Image (tube, rainbow, N blue to C red):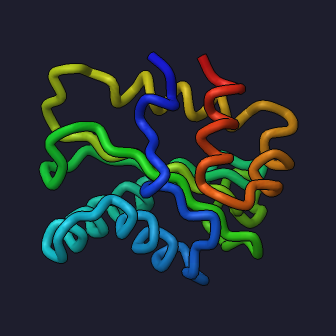
């Protein structure tokens, strides 16, 4: 399983507009192309998940994730906010790079946790933030995934 297999250019946004945690979640959800009702349900689920504990893993990265019946298969998105956003990350520093993961409650392929683990592993690479900061177009993000992840 490769991370590249789960991402597409239309689910990559290198210029998120949100200025708060809530706004960023909405920006990320919008990349999935869901209808308004599904977006609202997913937003509620992600906020509930964030209330349990921030998905800001530190070093400028957050991986908001949840299971929801608004999707019928695993969906992912990547977003970047150059100015950073307060996200209650474990290191209490702003978050610049966001990986959204949403999976249905019952997922036959059982890829949710492995994808979450692979993204966390990818995000922990020492120079990954520098690489993500240099990106100027979504295709470069996909190339970075191809180069860095198995």
Q: For the N terminus, which image quadrant? A: top left
Q: Quadrant of residue 93?
A: bottom right
Q: Residue at x 78, y 31 (%)?
A: 125
Q: Residue at x 75, y 55 (%)?
A: 135
Q: Residue at x 43, y 29 (%)?
A: 5
Foreground pick, 90 / 147:
147
Q: Quadrant of residue 124?
A: top right
Side (left or right) of 125 relative to 111: right
- State whether residue 53 appears in this view: no
Side (left or right) of 96 relative to 49: right
Side (left or right) of 19 relative to 41: right
Foreground pick, 139 / 54:
139
Q: Residue at x 30, y 68 (%)?
A: 43
Determine whether 3 is above or below 83 in the image: above
Residue 4, x across and y down, in percent: 51, 31
- State whether residue 26 appears in this view: yes
Side (left or right) of 64 relative to 121: left
Residue 84, x across and y down, in percent: 73, 71
Determine whether 150 is above or below 120 in the image: above
């Amino acid at each position: 399983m490769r991370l590249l297999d789960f991402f597409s250019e239309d689910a990559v946004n290198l210029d998120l507009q949100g200025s708060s945690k809530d706004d960023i979640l909405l920006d990320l959800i919008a990349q999935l192309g869901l209808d308004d009702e599904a977006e609202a349900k997913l937003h509620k689920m992600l906020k509930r998940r964030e209330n349990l504990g921030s998905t800001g893993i530190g070093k400028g990265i957050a991986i908001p994730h949840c299971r929801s019946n608004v999707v019928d298969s695993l969906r992912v998105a990547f977003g970047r906010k150059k100015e950073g956003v307060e996200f209650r990350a474990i290191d209490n520093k702003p978050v610049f790079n966001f990986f959204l993961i949403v999976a249905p409650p019952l997922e036959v392929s059982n890829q949710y946790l492995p994808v979450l683990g692979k993204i966390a592993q990818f995000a922990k690479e020492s120079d990954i933030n520098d690489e993500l900061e240099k990106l100027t177009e979504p295709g470069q993000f996909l190339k970075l995934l191809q180069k860095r992840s198995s």
